[in-house]
Image (cartoon, rainbow, N blue to C red):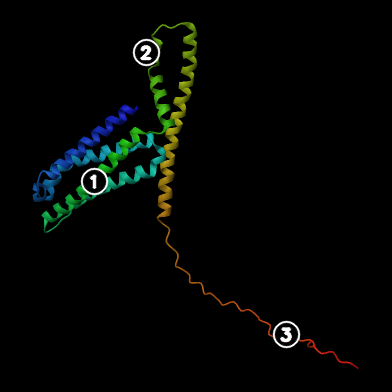
Amino acid sequence: MAIEDFGTSIIQFEVILQKITANMTSGVIFEKLKPPDLWKRSEADVTSLQNSALHLRELMLVFKPERTPTIERRTRALVQPLGSFKEILSRKSDDPLTNSKLALEELRKAVVEGSNLLDLAKEIKRQPSEGISAVLKLKEVYDAKEYLSAIPVPGAIYARFLGLRKYIENLQTSLSNLEQVLRDLRKNLDSVVDEMSKFRPMPTEELEEKPVEFEVSTSEEKGPEPSLVSENK
């Protein structure tokens, strides 16, 4: 997997998104189609957009694993209205055109969220994680080892190549381990989200403030009052 492959996937997703947007903005003809006809006209593009979005999510998780919550949230925001679009069109109704209009509202939401997902993918492509990017570049060098080995080189350089080859093989193993860690991380995040959804806020307890009583002493010790006149005996 290379950054160029990531860029190709972004372009494919953008093309599908633009096609759906153009079809929706070309007129109100879609709203005048009955649900079966509307689904027939849009099924291929909607399915392609969903599959492309899910594929793009996997690539983004590889190139920027620290943005996993954002990537998952943006992907769900696109996929959910696409599912609603299909579900509404499959409903039985006395007013089929109303269902078509409701379904198209969900499709419009999906297009907006698709633009947000596209912006996120482009951002990650511009600034992938440094560690992931370095490993993938070294993997590209490793994949090209057969071509490099066919070129005659001096013995000293060849010895260095052997060391580099061993180093790259270790990196490839680390990459495989990293991919497994990312898969486990996603599972753990899903479990945490599920557990958090089970929590409910506790009722607010009113705390009664009790006044603090202070004892004030009112007694005073009195001694003999001083006299200003001395008595002569």
Looking at the rendering, in which quadrant would you find the N terminus? top left
Specify which label sits upstream in the sequence, 2 or 3: 2
Coordinates of residue 142 in the picture (x, y in percent): 41, 20
In the picture provided, is 134 more to the left or to the right than 5?
right
**Image position of 157 (left or right of 225):** left
Residues at marks 1 and 3, CA–CA distance in whole angstroms: 82 Å
Q: Which mark is residue 199?
A: none
The image shows residue 172, relative to residue 112, as above or below, that is above
Disc 2 to disc 1, C-alpha distance: 45 Å
**Badge 3 density bin: few <14, some 14–19, many ≥20, Cα 10 Å:** few
Q: CA distance from mark 2 to mark 3?
A: 106 Å
Can residue 90 be seen by looking at this rendering? no
Residue at x 36% of width, y 44% of height: 70
Q: Secondary structure at mark 3?
A: loop
The quarter holding residue 198 reads bottom left
Sequence-wise first label, 2 or 1: 1
146 lies above or below 63 = above
Name the residue carrying label 2: 147
User: Between residues 213 and 81, which one lies in front from this camera angle?
Assistant: 213
Mark 3, residue position? 220
Question: Of tags 1 and 3, which is closer to the observer?
Answer: 3
The spot of residue 214 in percent (x, y) is 63, 79
**Local secondary structure at mark 2:** helix
Instruction: Kindly check if marks 2 and 3 are in contact, taking CB atoms under 8 A apart as contact.
Output: no
Quarter occupied by the C terminus:
bottom right
Q: Position of residue 119 (x, y in %)?
A: 29, 39
- For the residues bearing labels 1 and 3, Cβ distance under 8 angstroms: no
Tell me, yes or no, if residue 230 can be seen here: yes
Please give the residue where the numbered disc 1 appears in the rendered image: 112
